[in-house]
Amino acid sequence: MKQKLICGVDEVGRGAGAGDIYCAAVILNPEKPILGITDSKKLSAKKREMLAEEIREKATAWCIATASLQEIIDLNVLYATMLAMQRAVEGLPIVPDKIFIDGNRAPQLSGLVETVIKGDLKIQEIGAASIIAKVARDQKMVELHESYPVYGFDKHKGYLTQQHLDALQAHGPCAIHRVTYAPIKRLLHRSISKR
C-alpha cells in the first residue's frame, strides 16, 4: 500500500512588529527519520539551524512562502498568515494526502485539512515546518539588521521586546515596521502629540 503523504504547516512572525510572515509546508520521509523535531521555540538557534538543514535534505518535499509587510498592512495579519500558508502548500512539488495546520484556523486548501492547537509539539511535520520557517525568517531579520542597526533586529527578530520598543520610542518606525500594530500605533500617536 502506498505511504500516505502527510504535510505539516506552520507560520513564524505573526506576532512580530516588523518584517514579513514566513510559512512552511513540509512532507517528511518516514524512511529518513529525523531526531529532535519539536516546536522551534523550544530549541536553541544552533540546534534549529542544524535541524533545518537536515529537514531540507531529508524531507520528501518542503516549501517556504511569505506574506509581505504590505499584505499584512492591507489584509490584516490573520488573512496575510492564511495567504502565506496557502502559498507554502501550493508551492509543494507534490500533492499531500492530508494537511495538518498549526493553530485553530486554516486557509482555503483543496484536500483533507485538519487544524491542531500546539501542533508543533504533537505532529512531527508541523514541528519541521516551524523549524525551517523560523530559521529562514531569523536569517532574513539578521540581514535586515544590517540596513536598520538601531533596532536590534538581529536579537529580537522584530518581536516587540522592551529593547525594540525603546528603539522605536527613540527612532520612530522604519520601512519594515508594521505601523498598523497597536503598540507601534500608540508610540507613533504619542510622538506626534508631543510635537
Image (spheres, rainbow, N blue to C red):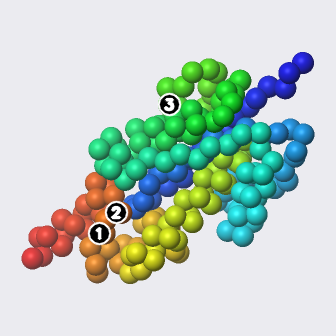
> To which quarter of the image does residue 151 belong?
bottom left
Q: Which of marks 2 and 3 is nearer the N terminus?
A: 3
102 to 19, vertically: above or below: above
Dot 2 alpha-carbon crowd within 10 angstroms: few under 14, some 14 to 19, many 20 or more: some
Q: In this view, does 2 lie to the left or right of 97?
A: right
Tell me which amino acid carries mark 3. Pro
Residue nearer the viewer, 128 or 102: 128
Label 2, label 3: how far apart the Cα atoms are: 25 Å
According to the image, label 1 marks what residue? 173
Using the rendered image of the protein, determine whether residue 186 is visible from the camera's viewpoint: yes
Tell me which amino acid carries mark 2. His
According to the image, label 3 marks what residue? 107
The residue shown at (71%, 48%) is: 128
Q: Is residue 44 left or right of residue 169?
A: right
Q: Is residue 87 left or right of residue 147?
A: right
136 to 129, vertically: above or below: below
Measured as percent of width and height from the top left, residue 103 is found at: 57, 39
According to the image, label 2 marks what residue? 177
| Tag 3 and tag 1, C-beta contact below 8 Å | no
Q: In which quarter of the image is the C terminus?
A: bottom left
Measured as percent of width and height from the top left, residue 163 is found at: 43, 77
The residue shown at (40%, 75%) is: 147
Residue nearer the viewer, 165 or 100: 100
